[in-house]
Image (spheres, rainbow, N blue to C red):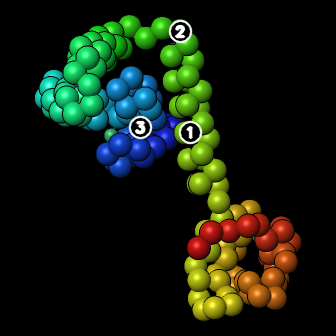
Amino acid sequence: MVEEVKVTCKICGSSVEASQFVLDHHYKMMACPMCIRDRKSKQKKNVEKQTEEQLVVADANNEENIEVLRSDASLGEIGVTNSPTTNEEDVDIEKEYRKKLIEREKEKEKAVRAVRLDDEKVKYKCPKCKYEFVYNTVKQAPARCPYCSDDVKEFVC
Ligand SMILES: [Zn+2]
Ligand SMILES: [Zn+2]
């Protein structure tokens, strides 16, 4: 069984399966189901609050702006309400984004992990044969895995 790749939600920071992400019009980015639910429950409140804030600002500047700002706020609401009927372009962006997320996660998994021992040395595990050996980052030695002679890859620690 292939495990679903989990990605971190940029908004709430929780780890969610990539396929669960939805392009959200309000956040203008991919959001996890929890954030969508959260956003929907807070949406009304926020819009009201924003409008109030905008009105205060507008009042200070120009009274004529008030009407414009009001219609802006309601337009935003309509846009969000329409979001379940995503158009094809959105679906494409969503697909692309998800693909990129998955690729990035895979890259991370592929990255060779090393454990820092001291200023010079790290414990490096050969990704090819899983042999563990001490690698000197200053001398950059050994350049190859002593066991399978595979090049020492870039690693993170
Ligand atoms: Zn989230
Ligand atoms: Zn090796």
Towards the viewer: 88 or 144: 88
Task: Say above or below: 40 vs 117.
Answer: above
Q: Please name whichever residue, 138 or 146, is drawn nearer the observer in this view of the structure.
A: 138
Residue drawn at x 64%, y 55% is 110
Q: Label 1 belongs to which residue?
A: 102
Secondary structure of residue under mark 1: helix
Q: Is residue 94 left or right of residue 67?
A: right
- Does 86 appear above or below 11? above
Name the residue carrying label 3. 17
Seen in the picture, residue 12 relative to 36 is either above or below; the reply is below
Residue drawn where x is 81% and y is 83% of the image: 140
Position of 78 relative to 48 (above/below): above
Residue 77 position in % (x across, y down): 26, 16
Assign the C terminus to one quadrant of the image.
bottom right
In the image: residue 9, left or right of residue 64: right
- The amino acid pointed to by label 3 is Glu
